[in-house]
Amino acid sequence: MTLLKVEDLKVHFPIRGGFFRTVVDHVRAVDGVSFELEEGETYGLVGESGSGKSTTGKAIVKLNKVTSGKILFEGQDIANYSSRQIKPYRRDIQMIFQDPYSSLNPKKRVLDIIAEPLRNFERHSPGEEKKIIQDYLDKVGLSPDSIYKYPHEFSGGQRQRIGIARSLTLKPKLIIADEPVSALDVSVQAQVLNFLQDLQEEFKLTYLFVGHDLGVIRHMCDRMGVMYRGRLVEEGTSKEIYNNPQHIYTKRLIAAIPDLEPSVREEKAIARQKVSEEYEQSYSKYFDEKGRAYDLKPISTTHRVALP
Amino acid sequence: MWKFILRRVLIMIPQLFILSIIVFAMAKAMPGDALSGKVMDPGISPERIEELRDQMGLNDPMHTQYIRWISNVAQGDFGQSYTHKTKVMNVIEDRVWQTVYLSLFTVIIIYALAIPLGILSGRYNDTWIDKAITGYTYVGFATPTFIFGLIVLFLFGFTLDLFPTGGTVSSKVDEGTFAYFLSKLNHMVLPAFSAALISTVGVVQYLRSEVVDNKLKDYVRTARSKGIPESKVYSRHILRNSFLPIAAFLGYEITGLIGGSIIIETIFSYPGIGQLFVTSISLRDFSVVTALVMLTGFATLLGTLLSDIILSAVDPRIRIE
Amino acid sequence: MGMNVETVTTAPPKEISPSGMKVIWREIRKDRMAMISLVVLGIVLIAVYSAALFIDKDAVARVDVFSIYMDPSSAYWLGTDYGGRDVFKQLIIGTRNSFSISLGITVLTALIGLSAGLIAGYFGGWTDNIIMRVIDFVITLPQMMFIIVLVTIIPKFTVTTFILIMTLFLWTGKARLIRSKVLSERELDYVHASQTLGTPHWKIILYHILPNVSSLIIVNFTLNLAGNIGLETALTFLGFGLPESTPSLGTLIAYATNPEVLEYRWWIWLPASVMILILMLSINFIGQALKRAGDARQRRG
C-alpha cells in the first residue's frame, strides 16, 4: 500500500533584488519531484549538497513552504494544510535531524525532550510518562537513569539516539531521516544505522532516508532516487542504481565511491576518468538547454531515468 | 552602492513625514498658542482674540493647519518666540553655532582619547595598562554625565578656579582677535571634557575588542610571518580594519552629543540649543520648543543616515542586508 | 574584567551545567569586583528601604523656615536645604524612590521589549518588518527632548505617567537585541524539531526559545537598570523627572544648579551624587560579570 505519494513537488525561494526589493527570481530548490513510498519500505534520496534532497524532506513535514505540487499521505493531500489542519498528521510523520547537537534543546532534561511530543498529543500522569520515556530510552539503548540529565552530558551518537527516541514516542508511520548519521563518527554510524533497521522491524516504520553517502543509502534503502539541482535524475531499486546506472550524473556519483581495496585502485581511477570524460561529452544529452534534468522515463517496471 | 544610498535616503522620507506629524501633534498638545501672550492683555477683548484666531487659521481643520505649518517649516519659518520677541529661527541661529562648536570640540577630544587608549588596551591586552584602561571604561560607562559634569564644575570651576564656570566667551576680549578665540576655547574646556571623558568610553571599548579580535586573525599572522615589524603590523594592517567602523560612528556620536547637550549646557550655563531648549520649556515658549524638537529630530535622522552610508561604504556586507 | 588580579586557579570543573543560575552564581563568586558590588548594593538597599520605613515622608517635605541651610550637625546629619528640610532623610527617601522607579521602568521595558523581540524574531516576515520599522524610527528620535516635552505637556503628571513615558522610548533597544538573538535561535534544529513534534508556536517561544535567550535578558536587564537610574536622576535634575511630591536623588542634586550650593554646601548634592555612582557602578559590575557568565568564551573558569 502506498503510504506517501509526492507529486510534482516544487519548493521555490524568492530572490529579492532591484531597487524596491521585489522578487526578481526564484531559487528552485525543489523543482518538480515525484516519488512514492510503500508502507514498510525504506526510500533513499541521494544527491550532493544543494540538490534539494533535504528541502524535499523538510517540505513533507512542513518546515519549508510548498510552492506547488501534492503531498499525499494515506491519500490525503497535506501540502497546503494550515498548521491546525496538519496537527493530526504530526503524529504520523516524524523527523530525525542531521545535527544531534542543535536538534536537542540544551536547556531541557532528557525527560522533557522525549516527552515533548507526548505532552502535545496525549495525557499521562507524571508517573506513567516517566515509565514510557524510560521504556523508549531502553529501546534506543540508553540507561533509563539518564532521564534527568542534560543533552551536553551525552556523546553525539547518544544524542542522536535521544532524538530517535523522541521521534518514536508517538508511534509514527513515516520517519524522515535527514542525514541522521552524517554528523557522527564513522564507528558510531554503523551502530545507529543497524539500530534504525531494528526499530523499523519492531515498529513497522517507513523511512524516507535523506543522505549524500551512497554507502549508507545502499545499506539502508530498498529503493532510492538520485537528485540533482532540485530534480530527480534517476530512480530505482538500490540494486538497479548501483549495478546499472543509466543517467550520467548517477554514473559519476557511483564512480566516486571510494574503494578500500588497494589492488583495484588503478582500475577504479581509470574508470573514474572514463566516466568523467563521458560526463563532459554527453552532458547536453542529459540536460536541456537550461541545464534542467528531463522528466523521468521508465526503462523497466521499477527503474526510471531522466532522459529526453 | 548608489542604490543603497538612494534607498536609504528614500526611507528617510516617510520617517521625516512621521516625525513632522508627531512634532505637530505635540505642538498642538502644548498649552497655549501664538496668542496666549496676548490673552493676558486686559486691553484685548475675548471676542477680538477669537477674531484673531480665525484670521490666523487656528480654528481651521487640523490637516489644513498641518499643511500650512509644514510648508512654513520647510521654508525655515517656525513663527515668533514670545519671550525673545523675534522670529524663532533668529533665536535658534544664534545658539546653534555655539552647540556646533562645542560638539566639534567634544568629538575631537573623544577620538583623540579613544584611539590611543583603545589601541594600547587592545595591543597589550591583559597587562596592567589594559587593566587600567578597561577599569576606566567600566567606571566611565557607569557614571552619568550630569554627575560627572557637576563634580568637574565643582572641582575645576569653583574650588580650584581654573576655568570659567559659564558662558561662551569673556566679555573683556574683542571679537575677531586671537584672544577671543582662546577665550572661547577656554570656556569650552570644562563642558567638552566632561562630555568627552564619558562618551569616549564606548569607542575605547569598541576599538579594544576590534584590535583584540583582529590581532589573532590569519591575515595578521601572515603579515607577521612575512617579517613585518610589529609596529607596522598595527599601523598598516590592524588599524586599517579597525578604524573605518570607528570613523563611521561619527554620525551616531554627533547625534548623541546633540541629545547630551541638554545636560552639559545646563550644567555649564553654556548658551547653546540644549540650554535654550530647557529655558524655553520652563518659560513655556513653545514655538521655540517645537522648532528645536523638529530640527534636532531632522539632524538626528541625518546623523544616522550619514553613519549608515559610511558604514555601508566601509563594509559591503551591510548593503546586502 | 580588568581591575582585579585573578588569583583563583582551580581546575576547570568537569561538568559544565547548563542550568543558567548555577553558572551565573559561580561566575559572580569568582569575580571579586562583582562580589563586592553585590554585597555593597545589598547593604545599601536593605539600609535604605528599612530606614525609609521609619521616616515620616510628610515631615521631610515640610518647609521649616527656622532651619534654612543649616550645616551638618547631630540633628541634621547632612544639614538642611533652602526650605529647612533634612537632607539626609531626603537622601534616604530619594534613593528608595529613584531605585524603585528605575526598577519599574526596567521591568516594564523588559516585558514590552521581550515580547516585541520574541514575536518579531520568531515569526519574521511582515510582523518583523513592521516592528523593526517602528523600532528603527523610535531609536533615531532625540529621545531626551521628546521625554522632556511629553513630561511638560501631560496634564496630570504622576509617577505612573513618568514610567510610561520613559517606557515608550526605552523598550526599543531591548527589543532589537532580543530579536537578533531569536533570529539565530529559531534557525536551530531544536526549534524545527519542536515544530514537527506538533508543539504550538506560543509554547515554542515561551518554553524553548525564551530559556535560551534568558542570560541575554538578565544581563541586559541589569545594565538597563543602572542606565535608567542615571536617566531618571538626570531628568529630575533638569526638572523634568519625578513630580515634586516624590523626591528623587536628582532632586537633591538639582540644588547644585545654584552656584552657592554647588560651591559652599557640597553636603547637599555630593552625597546624592555619590549614592548614584555607588548604585550604578555596583549594578554595572554585576551586569558585566553576568555578561561574562553568559558568554562562554569569556568565562573564567
Image (cartoon, helix red, strand yellow):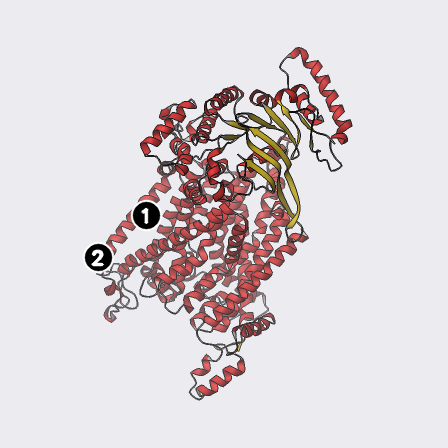
Name the residue tied to disc 2. C54
Residue C76 screen position, x and y as percent:
24, 61
Residue A95 screen position, x and y as percent:
50, 32
Residue B86 screen position, x and y as percent:
53, 78
Chain containing the residue with disc 1: C
Q: Secondary structure at mark 2?
A: loop
Q: Amino acid at mark 1?
A: Leu
Residue B163 seen anywhere in this rendered image of the structure: no
Tell which residue pokes out farthest to the right in this image.
A281
Residue sitting at x 28%, y 58%: C93
Name the residue tied to disc 1. C41
- Please tell me which of labels 2 and 1 falls first in the chain: 1
User: In the image shown, does A34 or C180 lie closer to the viewer?
Assistant: A34
Q: Secondary structure at mark 1?
A: helix
Q: Separation of disc 2 and disc 1 at Cα?
A: 20 Å
Residue A266 screen position, x and y as percent:
70, 14
Where A33 sits versus C113, above or below? above
Residue sitting at x 58%, y 73%: B72
Left or right? Give the position of C164 relative to B117.
left
Chain containing the residue with disc 2: C
Occupied quadrant, residue C52 = bottom left
